[in-house]
Image: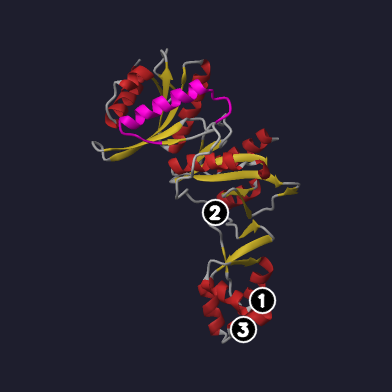
Amino acid sequence: MKNDLIARVTEILKEAGFIVSSRCKAKSFDLAARRGDLILLVKVLYNIDGLSDEIARSIKRAAFSLLASPLVVGERKGSFFLEDDVIYHRHGIPAINVNTLYDYFIAGVRPYVYSATGGLYVNINGELMRMAREKKELSLGDIASRLGVSRRSVSKYEEGGVSTTINIALKLEEILDTVLIEPLEFLANEREEPLPPEVTEAGIDDATSDLERYILGMMEEIGFEIFTTTHAPFNAVSLSQLRSRNESIRILTGISKYTQQVIKRARILSSLSTVTNTHSVFVVNGNVKRVQVDHTVLMEKEELKRIRDPEEFTCVIREKMSNDRDG
């Protein structure tokens, strides 16, 4: 069922003009997609209540480091189907169904309604409301009396930032003969760095964790800012500002021993780096039999030890990619 849902989401995003990554074999997001400057990290769940706080934080942390917007696409919440063109939220991430995904990105229909505790709500343009009320020479008390709410509630509507139920909003529009309900802007980059989940990824043993800390410690020493991730296809996003090129560089950084699993993960990183406009590198503990898998560069741990700064690191990975193409 989830496979069918992922296929449908991928189909809609591609039809909407997005570049879509291959499916990520990880617990966090399932797909990355980009259209212009908009990057999405999409988690697909049949039931959106299945999203845990830990996984949500891991998705938001990856989104923060990649300047992306997290999004959940599902079919149900509990035993109920998600309604079309309604925005839900789970642990701070917007959640929609596939019909809403289609309507928003292909049909150009912007959602106006969101679900919260107690029902469905909309946002009102407070300034338009005040102007329409004053034009009709109605007081706050007049509006409150007709709506059956307190004068203070009406005042808060005009002040802005306060939501109301659909029924109240429609009645208010009828009284003032003005469209007041505003469309929702539900896609946004994470503005503050989310804290990393307290629980590390299942299956990582102490030795591997030590290797991650060692490699990422070396990356920090040579001048990279490190955003660690859990449950993601990569172990961290490494960020630096290259002075010589006056540009910032983001590197999807994987860490592992050299196994066939590394090759599979490197292919996923390559797909993600293409979508997110980043580089991808796998630092391997041991000897590597190839220098590149698709667009992902493989680098031995001992080679990393000899690198002095991000500029040299970038030169090394570009040289490896160039040599691999020439070969």
Q: Position of residue 224 (x, y in %)?
A: 34, 34
132 or 204: nearer the eye?
A: 204
Horizontal side, residue 86 vs residue 194: left or right: right
Q: Where is residue 43 in the image (x, y as percent from the top left)?
A: 59, 40
Give me the disc on residue 141: 3
Marks 1 and 2, the one that precedes in the sequence: 1
Q: Determine the secondary structure under disc 2.
A: loop
Q: Is residue 296 visible?
A: no
For mark 1, what is the residue? Answer: 149
Q: Cβ–Cβ below 8 Å for labels 1 and 2?
A: no
Q: Give the range drawn in magenta.
A: 201-226
Quote the CA–CA distance across marks 1 and 2. Answer: 28 Å
Q: Cβ–Cβ below 8 Å for labels 3 and 1?
A: no
Marks 3 and 2, the one that precedes in the sequence: 3
Quote the CA–CA distance across marks 3 and 2. Answer: 33 Å
Q: Is residue 42 visible?
A: yes
Horizontal side, residue 279 vs residue 30: left or right: left
For mark 2, what is the residue? Answer: 186
Horizontal side, residue 145 vs residue 245: left or right: right
Q: Which amino acid does label 1 sit on?
A: Val
Quote the CA–CA distance across marks 3 and 1. Answer: 9 Å
